[in-house]
Amino acid sequence: MTKGPTEIPGILGGMGPAATAEFFRLICDLAPSEKDQNHPRVYILSDPWIPDRTEAIIGDGQDPGPFILEDMKKLALWGASFLVVPCNTAHVFIDRLAGEIPLPLVHIVDATIEEAARRSARGAWLMGSRGTLDSGIYQKHAKKSAYPLAIPSPELQKKTQEVIRLVKANEKDKAGAFLEDIVCKLREQHDLPVIAACTELPLAWKSSRLPAKGTISSLEALASACINRLYPEGKV
């Protein structure tokens, strides 16, 4: 191979910025490439000014849907071949926009559930933002394949939201320590892996002492799905 794939991913990021940077790092790491020219061309639009997704879902914020759609159209105009959005909660609004999205989309929820089913047929804990869990988007997509999800208590969900906030505030060490306590409490109830269904959670997990095999990262699942599309002859 002298050049990378002909398809160009259009990454709509900034929700949050650190998760977007980690996602692009994963794309680089997973690409079956031997030199620069083997990697895919990638267009990244990092837009942290998109209104908060969880606040909109719980009725306290502006609808981010029009902003997401506008940015997707920009990526299409730039020449992207398909779209990728490394933010789980954003997909609540993306699903509502399905008929208006200008390009094919690699869906983070579907990619994550497929990876979870491959890793743990018995099911998994679902950890994510309040918006993601309240919306039921994972439960809805998991129902298609009858994949069992365990849902944390409201108390542990509130603590998970604090982990997410700490990562966004660039306090990853604190987030990792906080996450350890939550996961230990979940495992006392059911010994299942944890779906990190917020793209900040894998960053907190990396800063914790929790074993890497204990989580199913939505960031890694999405990156793998993108690489499989870009390199169909050499899947990861």
Image (cartoon, grey):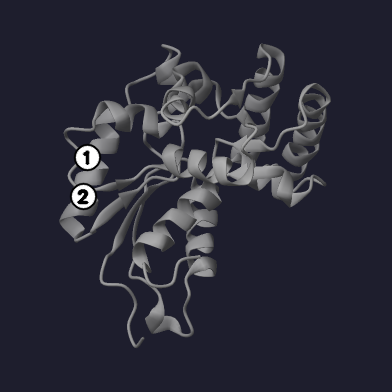
Callout 1 amino acid: Glu
Instruction: Give the percent coordinates (x, y) of residue 55.
Output: 45, 20
Per the model, the C-alpha gap separating discs 2 and 1 is: 6 Å
Q: Residues within 10 Å of mark 1 (few under 14, many from 20)?
A: few
Q: Residue at x 39, y 80 (%)?
A: 38
Q: On the image, which quarter does residue 125 sit in? A: top right
Q: Residue at x 53, y 61 (%)?
A: 26
Left or right of 104 on screen, residue 60: right
Q: Residue at x 33, y 28 (%)?
A: 93
Instruction: Give the percent coordinates (x, y) of residue 103.
Output: 20, 48
Q: Which residue is mark 1?
A: 70
Q: Residue at x 41, y 61 (%)?
A: 228
> How many marks overall?
2
Left or right of 205 on screen, residue 93: left
User: SS class of the residue under badge 2?
Assistant: helix
| Disc sitting over residue 74 in the figure | 2
Asked whether 137 or 40 is in front, the reply is 137
Decide: is 165 above or below 27.
above
Left or right of 179 on screen, residue 136: left
Quarter of the figure with the N terminus: bottom left
Q: On the image, which quarter does residue 191 sit in? A: top right
Asked whether 216 or 11 is in front, the reply is 216
C-beta proximity under 8 Å, tags 2 and 1: yes
Instruction: Give the percent coordinates (x, y) of residue 45.
Output: 34, 52
Instruction: Give the percent coordinates (x, y) of residue 235.
Output: 45, 66
Q: Residues within 10 Å of mark 2 (few under 14, many from 20)?
A: some
Asked whether 27 or 195 is in front, the reply is 195
Does residue 224 appear in the picture of this structure? yes
